[in-house]
Amino acid sequence: MEIPKAYEPQSVEDKWYDFWVKQGCFTANAASAKPAYSIVIPPPNVTGMLHMGHVLNNTIQDILSRKARMDGKEVLWLPGTDHAGIATQVQVEKALRKEEKKTKYDLGREEFLKRVWAWKEKHGGIIINQLKKLGCSCDWTRERFTMDPEYSRCVQKVFVDLYKKGLIYRGKRMVNWCPASLTALSDEEVEMEPQKGFLYYFRVEVAEVVGQASSLSSSSGFQPESVITSREGRLEACPTPTGKDACATAIRRTDIWLTIATTRPETIPGDTAVAVNPKDPRYASLIGKHVLRPLPAEYPPEKKLIPIIGDEHIDIEFGTGVLKVTPAHDKADFEIGQRHKLAAVDIMEPNARMNDLAGADLAGLDRFEARKVAVEKLRALGALVKEEPYENKVGFSQRARVPIEPRLSEQWFLKYPSVEKSKACVEQEGSAGGPPADSGGSPESSLNQFESGERVLGGPPNTTRGPRVLPAKMRFHPQRWAKVYDHWLTNIQDWCISRQLWWGHRIPVWSITCEGKQTTDVFHILDQCLSETLEDLLKDKGKESAIRIINAETGVLLRPNATEFNHGLNGVRVHVQVASVDEKSIASLEGNGFTQDPDVLDTWFSSWLWPFATMGWTGDKAQDSSNATLQKFYPTTDLVTGPDIIFFWVARMIMAGYEFMGDLPFRNVYFTGIIRDKQGRKMSKTLGNSPDPLELIAKYGADALRFGTMRGAPLGQDVLFDEKDVELGRNFCNKLWNACRFRQMQGGEVQGEINPNLLRSDDKWILLKLDQAVRELTESLATYNFSQAAQAIYRFFWNEYCDWYVETTKSVLGRPPEPSPSPLNGESAGVRGENGSDASHEVKTPPHPGPLPPSRGGEGDATRANVLAVIDFVLSHTLRLFHPFMPFITEELWHSMGFKEDMPADQGGTSIMTAPWPKPFSTEERDFYSLDDCYLEFANAKFEVVTQGRNLRREANLPSNKKVKFVLKPAQELSDNDREVIRTLLNAEAFDLVPDYAPAKGTPTTRTPLGELYLPLEGLVDVGAETARLKKELEKFASEIGKIEAKLNNAGFVAKAPPQVIEQSRKQLEELQAKSAHAKKALETLGAG
RNA sequence: GGACGCUUAGCUCAGUGGUAGAGCAUUACCUUCACACGGUAGGGGUCGCAGGUUCGAAACCUGCAGCGUCCACCA
């Protein structure tokens, strides 16, 4: 019964979380008739740990989910984890090295993957439990992992589907190669970073080739296959790009020298041309001639010979205007190489050590070591002209933090699907269509924005291409991200989806080397393995096959009916693309000499299916249309994520959504800010500036962490995290706790009914303020303004409810001190309204609200009960408003305060989670309680009296604990209640109303809206101090009066400003003048004596 | 080189045309029976700079500066 003095979150959080789970509060019912609301969690790395970014992100999702439940929605917040290919594999490799001093190669693929799975089992639950500690109301019965068997099937299905559509292809291309992780990366996984280095200038001699008219370059026509190293980096072909013919060629030196600027001299051995701009008069005449490449130094002249080519892309201004072209080690050079049919000489191993083609001096060296050696070599050869310090941007592997190496390798690529649709579906800022017609303005209309969307989208996914009922538009919050998104989609490049890793979805492609096997043998094998027979395929010529056989070397599709196919497959490696992959057919494929592609898919190739793959999508129309979850909850309502993965994830999910579901995956995307530390630095493990959220929860409580974080996280801006914010959250929880404790100490049951006839002006004031808070909060949440929402409830509860309202109740609830014996009290306060119920007709003058009979008999008890009823009303609403932000403490108080008692079981009777979200008062309710805005004005006047009185006391240097009296020369009637409230708030022994008060000389005084206020000091008067105070006050008034007068004297203002603004200024002026006059008079009185 | 964002109190940030705000920090007073994780009162800002629009600008427009982020194949 007795509530502890301070809130102790540790004792309640686990209890309620277990309660919610046991009650099934988080479980979404796909069969429910309620409107759907859904969010899919951005799946955290399965073996990751919770950090502040997760806290921000998931708190927002929880707020949205809990709010939606209170709005009566059927909510699905779908949780899960991501297998996080590289990150997880690196973790396990690291542990393996540390604990067993082994590499993954020591274990072999199968054994290593067993270890990763074991690691996943051991660490996989951690982050999920951390989310639970935070209070996340996810539907754990639907938890998914991107490598669950069903999920993996989705990935395969999608791969095959895109393959059939011709969007997935294999090719030898320039990719971003990470020499540390030994895998290809997508463009998005590369970050450009400025790098300090040098620009090296070296010279080469121009040489002419005698006797062979045509350029040598044509003899080494470029083909991707003609790359001069294998994927493993071993030597495969003749290292000279010029081929045999060159050997027979006579070379004539010219003693003409070209100077070339480069940042990468170590790649000189890979140069296969020198390029100049044909418009460059300095060099144009040299195009077609050759130069002698200085490295490898040991090569004979004919092996050093490379052509001078002309290419428009060469910047005449940069360096010397001559570019060395290294097709195998630079993306731009590769393209030049393609245009000019240059050979690409790969001079590096996958780990970025130089190979034999780099020449004897460099072979075996790391690329940066090789750079130094190459420079020294050039210097020794007399080819180095100069070196100057230079800063340029270098691509770094996002994860391994080493410079990537542009590298030619054979990879799988995806041509993005549904690009145009994905572009069109996101609303652009200030677009002609504008925001949805019903999006702005009142909270109600903002809420409708979602609802109208859901109604349209709630039906079966529209997989046909027919027109939609409404244009399906998606909104980004803040909207400026739409532009970033659009820009990316406009310049979109094919996606390199294969990774040379072991942990991940293995590419569902099998191949066989058909040495000695005839076509029919291969058919036979496939026939045994697969349910779909090749006979059918052969018959069905025009149709896309379920099984495709490709020449692995050329990438050419070998259709079963093609002639080349009929020639047999001797010695040719073929790929077989399998549509329906079940374990049995895989096993038999592998048993018959087929091997699966060793690579795995980019992690994002599974993540981009998250919104529907988690809901049990199969790609089978019949099956999907009977999938209740998918039908009910796709498309989802909101997505909450960081802008750093807008390309990695958001954009791709949108494309996948259109491609496979025929519909966008979500209606709204809220982009959070990035959490930084106090100094604005990114959180990072190496800096050690990333606090452990669990420690914060242990120290302050989950609600405190949530509230503190939300309060400081403005819309779309980065968040500077400070533990002080969490402290603020804790203090706020404690305030809430104690406000409820105060109510409990008053005893009695929850007061259900408020009697409008007994409402004091203060009661009406707080009800109006509550109403305002409900509106503000609802509006803020509807527009994703979480920090605004948090501040709105903070302000309402602390500054309005606790600081003012609760204090006003103490004169009714508490044991009031004996009334002041002043004989004047009774008379001055005697005239008052007999009944407050008709207060609403008063508009002009502050009404005198409900009678507060002197504490005698039943009438006083009735008022007391009524005040408790108001308190209960406000608290029960406030707890609900707080619930999405602070689920634990509100649930605890909801139960211990007894607010659940008279609620229906599914509407707050069991848990506050399903209590209805407070609504603003209707007109009828406002009328019933006579909630007129004039009460706000009157209460403000009262509060001003109090503030000014406290100020007088402070100015007179009276310590807070010293008892004082105040006297008011009333300008209007005040009820006993108002008088008593003011007295209590002033912490005064007495607050007397004396119409004809004659103050002692030097009595501090000020003019308030309710009359002249005096602080009688009885012998302690300090005339000097009071004089000084009044003078200071007068100065302030004079300055403000001056400003307003200047404004009113401005003819333009009076002529053009709106009338109410002018009226307001006049009123202000009057008030200030009256105050000033009062102070002046007081000052004169002082001087007179 | 493009695009976007930010610049308001010591700090972190609200504030989209009408009297400059909050939290923290700070100063003074107070352990008064909800709360010292508290209360009361105060101090502190020519709203980055320069122009313009307007009766009126922190806000709208233009330019500039500084910081930050993203995109881009100048070696």
Image (cartoon, coloured by chain):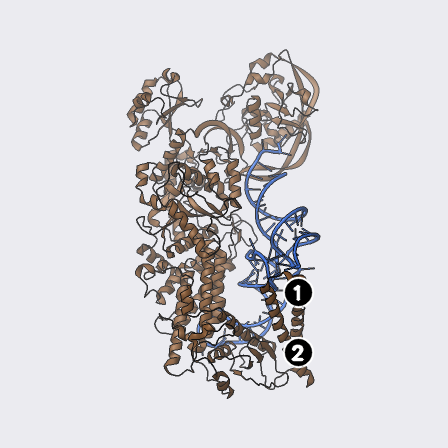
Q: Colour of chain B?
A: blue
* Badge 2 vs badge 1, beta-carbon distance below 8 Å: no
Q: Is B75 located above or below residue A792 in the figure?
A: above
Given residues A545 and A686, the one toward you in this image is: A545
Question: What whole-number distance in Å separates the C-alpha atoms at marks 2 and 1?
Answer: 24 Å
The chain that hosts pointer 2 is A
Q: Which residue is mark 1?
A: A1047
Q: Which mark is residue A271?
A: none
Q: Chain of mark 1?
A: A
Tell me if A189 is positioned left or right of A1085 in this view.
left
Measured as percent of width and height from the top left, residue A309 is found at: 62, 22
Q: Quadrant of the C terminus of chain A?
A: bottom right
Image coordinates of residue A370 in percent, x first then y, are 59, 31
Q: In the image, residue A74 lies at what x, y percent?
A: 35, 52
Mark closest to the chain's N terminus, 2 or 1 = 1
Residue A256 occupies quadrant: top right
Say what amino acid the circle numbered 1 marks.
Answer: Lys
Q: Residues within 10 Å of mark 1 (few under 14, many from 20)?
A: some
The answer to whether marks 2 and 1 sit on the same chain is yes
The kind of residue on which mark 2 rests is Lys
Which of the two residues, A46 or B67, is positioned nearer the viewer here?
A: B67
Q: Colour of chain A?
A: brown
Q: Nearer the viewer, residue B8 or A108?
A: B8
Which of these two is toward me, A263 or A301? A263
Report the residue at 48% width, 83% height from top: A831
Q: Select label 2 or label 1 by which is in front.
A: 1
Please tell me whether mark 1 sits on a helix, a strand or a loop: helix
Residue linked to disc 2: A1080
